[in-house]
Image (spheres, grey):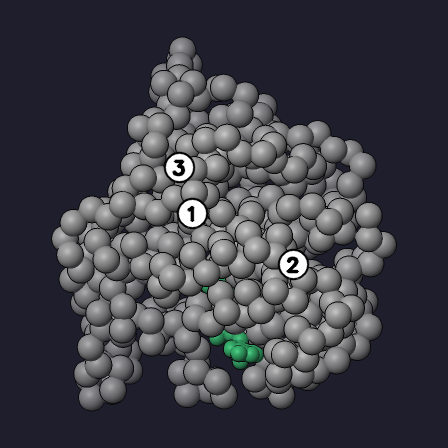
């Protein structure tokens, strides 16, 4: 077990500047480098690290400074969606663990390159999919593993979050480095943000461990929301209102798994809506759950069953949350951001594979290019088997507090 983990941290934008404080608070972690293209963000990031108990990190605009430092154990990559696979591969080739934020790959080749690099180097790659560690998702995982749902047949999930004001058109003229996301909406039409729901669903359906995704079909609506928003809020003559956006407002994706279960994903980010939802639902032969109705129903319950989630969370609490409830870590996302960062660091310290591994990471990243192809051609596409047959008989998962492939009870590993 490593006493200390030395990390290089890349990307101090909207997401990265907040998450860095979690790593700064961890007594076993030393943030040795901060890297960004912006000197101002670097300086602010350094202040954040110091404020939260870390030593002053070295600041660099050149990622290769981290790669070329043999004392660095792990790299945390928090830049926008493009360019991350290349950074992760450089890190793995230099013998470092790599963590990447959520989001899709641009191409399938990038996914295969990541897998080849992982298999050649043996260095773990983890997508920091925080929603795998959210309370609802962990409770559902626990219930599925206990058999409460019987056989799981169908899961839904979505990213239902109107991003127009809060993300896509936010601070357009203020940010010194343009945010990457609007460009993606201009240039691509695809399921671009599936992993918040697909990550937990994949673990529920044992994808890459006894099951795998075999086929995918995506359908996109027309793209009207961004232009309408820009015309209304930025003026009809604004370049954002006269621009063309390829990204359909609503994208539905159906994935079929080898065991016959299906997954329905929805991307819904550019039309007005009243509330944020990931709308996760699990349908099994013995139970159903619905995030939108806040209901978990098991066969035999007296109906009507309404709003009983809190009660069911209590009854089927995952051991990690049982313990986390008593911790005093403050996290804007209810715990999941802290837990996913902790899960990564725990694997680096123990020098074991990460609970979201390279196969999970690329499977989720591949939804971007696969959905783009399906929308473009109007046909289903075969899902590549990144495990090359290993999914049928994988090595046992690494057990531990943060394991997502089985439910482990581990009172030894500290959460804080
Ligand atoms: N898990 C979550 O809940 C969650 C929430 C929001 C965003 N995200 C993810 O976080 C990631 C970052 O999003 P964001 O909104 O912070 O983006 P952003 O554009 O605000 O920040 C990206 C930062 O990376 C820096 N950068 C880009 N390329 C670089 C390079 N080659 N070298 C050094 N620095 C570089 C930029 O200068 C910028 O500061 C995305 O993958 C996004 O999907 C996750």
Report whether residue 319 is seen: yes
Tag 3: Cα neighbours inside 10 Å, few (<14), some, or many (≥20)? many
Give the SS element for disc 2. Answer: strand
**Separation of disc 3 and disc 2 at Cα?**
25 Å
Question: Which one is nearer the viewer's eye here, 182 or 57?
Answer: 57
Q: Foreground mark, 1 or 2?
A: 1
Question: Which one is nearer the viewer's eye here, 171 or 208?
Answer: 208
| Residue matched to label 2 | 97
* Left or right relative to 181: residue 131: right
Q: Foreground mark, 3 or 1?
A: 1
* Left or right relative to 287: residue 376: left
Q: Where is residue 400 in the image (x, y as percent from the top left)?
A: 69, 37
Residue sitting at the far front: 120
Residue sitting at the far top: 300
Compared to 293, does 353 lie above or below?
A: below
Identified at 35% across, 53% down, the residue is: 367
Report whether residue 293 is seen: no
Q: Are marks 3 and 2 in contact (CB under 8 Å)?
A: no
**Separation of disc 1 and disc 2 at Cα?**
19 Å
| Residue matched to label 1 | 386
Compared to 74, does 159 lie above or below?
A: above
Residue sitting at the far right: 3
Question: Which one is nearer the viewer's eye here, 61 or 42?
Answer: 61
Question: Which one is nearer the viewer's eye here, 197 or 369?
Answer: 369
| Residue matched to label 3 | 212
* Left or right relative to 349: residue 207: left
Compared to 267, does 140 lie above or below?
A: above
Identified at 42% across, 63% down, the residue is: 110
Give the SS element for disc 1. Answer: loop
Q: Position of residue 106 (x, y in %)?
A: 37, 65
């Amino acid at each position: 077990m490593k006493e200390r983990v030395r990390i290089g941290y890349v990307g101090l934008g909207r997401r990265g500047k907040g998450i860095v404080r979690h790593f700064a608070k961890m007594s076993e972690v030393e943030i040795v480098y901060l890297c960004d293209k912006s000197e101002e963000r670097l300086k602010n990031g350094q202040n954040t690290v110091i404020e939260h108990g870390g030593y002053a990190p070295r600041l660099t605009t050149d990622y290769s400074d981290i790669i070329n430092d043999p004392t660095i154990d792990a790299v945390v990559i928090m830049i926008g969606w493009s360019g991350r696979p290349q950074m992760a591969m450089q890190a793995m080739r230099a013998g470092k663990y790599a963590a990447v934020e959520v989001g899709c790959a641009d191409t399938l080749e990038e996914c295969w390159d990541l897998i080849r690099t992982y298999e050649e180097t043996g260095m773990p790659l983890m997508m920091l999919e925080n929603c795998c560690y959210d309370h609802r998702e962990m409770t559902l995982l626990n219930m599925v593993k206990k058999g409460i749902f019987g056989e799981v047949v169908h899961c839904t999930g979505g990213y239902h979050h109107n991003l127009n004001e809060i993300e896509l058109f936010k601070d357009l003229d203020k940010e010194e480095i343009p945010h990457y996301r609007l460009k993606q909406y201009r240039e691509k039409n695809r399921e671009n943000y599936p992993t918040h729901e697909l990550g937990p669903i994949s673990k529920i359906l044992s994808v890459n461990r006894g099951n795998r995704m075999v086929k995918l079909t995506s359908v996109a609506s027309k793209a009207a929301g961004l232009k309408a928003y820009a015309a209304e809020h930025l003026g009809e003559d604004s370049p954002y209102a006269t621009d063309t956006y390829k990204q359909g407002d609503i994208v539905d994706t159906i994935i079929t798994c080898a065991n016959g279960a299906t997954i329905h994903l929805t991307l819904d980010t550019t039309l007005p809506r009243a509330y944020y939802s990931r709308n996760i639902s699990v349908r099994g032969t013995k139970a159903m759950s619905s995030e939108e109705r806040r209901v978990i129903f098991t066969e035999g319950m007296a109906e009507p069953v309404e709003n009983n989630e809190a009660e069911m969370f209590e009854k089927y609490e995952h051991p990690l949350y049982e313990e986390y409830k008593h911790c005093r870590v403050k996290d804007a996302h209810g715990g999941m951001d802290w837990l996913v960062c902790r899960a990564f660091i725990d694997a680096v310290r123990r020098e074991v594979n990460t609970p979201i591994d390279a196969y999970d990471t690329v499977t989720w990243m591949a939804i971007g290019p696969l959905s783009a192809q399906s929308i473009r051609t109007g046909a289903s596409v075969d899902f590549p088997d990144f495990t090359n047959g290993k999914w049928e008989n994988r090595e046992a998962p690494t057990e531990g507090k943060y394991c997502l492939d089985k439910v482990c009870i581990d009172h030894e590993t500290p959460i804080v």
